């Protein structure tokens, strides 16, 4: 067995604004805040720890840093839109009116959105 084979992963996301990010992940996305201290906040999601690290001089990446597997992307997009979340559209991706891309061969669907710091997140039902 490999050294980390049975280890539970933790995801680390950076933010510039602690209060704004904590509100977004807890209220808009509905994640449960498990712990908060002067360095960050931790949320539990699907058995994986999501840690928000507060970094004053942070620049978000342009690619997806965190994806959520959901049973139905269309339902998830509708629920997130009700919370005020806007979905990204990308040239050449042939997304539908909700911003959902059906993957080649119909193997799944995905939609992308950003958190308040510009981190790209996704929902997928692959």
Image (tube, rainbow, N blue to C red):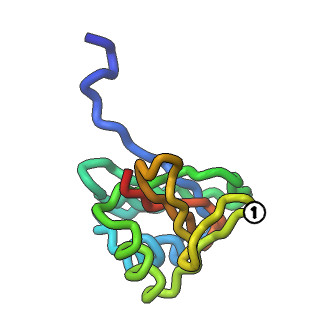
Tell me the quarter of the image containing the N terminus: top left
How crowded is the residue under tag 1: few (<14 C-alpha within 10 Å), some, or many (20+)?
few
Count all numbered tags in the image, as a single digit.
1
Q: Which residue extends farthest top?
A: 1
Front in this rendered view, residue 86 or 61: 86
Q: Looking at the image, is 41 positioned above or below residue 98?
A: above
Indicate left or right for 126 with 52 as reference.
Answer: left
Q: Looking at the image, is 58 positioned above or below residue 95?
A: above
Q: Which of the 4 image quarters holds residue 96? A: bottom right
Q: Which of the 4 image quarters holds residue 91? A: bottom right
Can residue 7 be seen? yes
Residue 79, x across and y down, in percent: 38, 81
Can residue 58 be seen? no
Q: Which residue extends farthest front?
A: 105
Secondary structure of residue under mark 1: loop
- Residue depicted at x 40% and y 73%: 74
Residue 49, x across and y down, in percent: 33, 50
Front in this rendered view, residue 103 or 24: 103
- Residue depicted at x 48% and y 83%: 81
Front in this rendered view, residue 4 or 17: 4
Q: Looking at the image, is 22 positioned above or below residue 56?
A: below
Front in this rendered view, residue 86 or 105: 105
- Residue depicted at x 73% and y 56%: 59
- Residue depicted at x 35% and y 76%: 75
Residue 94, x across and y down, in percent: 64, 63
Q: Dot 1 corresponds to which residue?
A: 91
């Amino acid at each position: 067995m490999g050294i980390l084979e049975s280890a539970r992963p933790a995801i680390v996301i950076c933010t510039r604004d602690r209060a704004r990010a904590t509100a977004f992940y807890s209220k808009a996305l509905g994640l449960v805040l498990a712990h908060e201290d002067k360095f960050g906040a931790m949320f539990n999601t699907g058995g994986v720890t999501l840690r928000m690290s507060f970094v004053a001089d942070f620049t978000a990446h342009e690619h997806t840093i965190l994806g959520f597997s959901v049973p139905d992307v269309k339902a998830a997009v509708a629920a997130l839109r009700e919370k005020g979340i806007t979905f990204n559209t990308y040239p050449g991706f042939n997304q539908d009116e909700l911003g959902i891309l059906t993957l080649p061969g119909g193997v799944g669907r995905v939609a992308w959105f950003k958190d308040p710091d510009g981190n790209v997140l996704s929902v997928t039902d692959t």
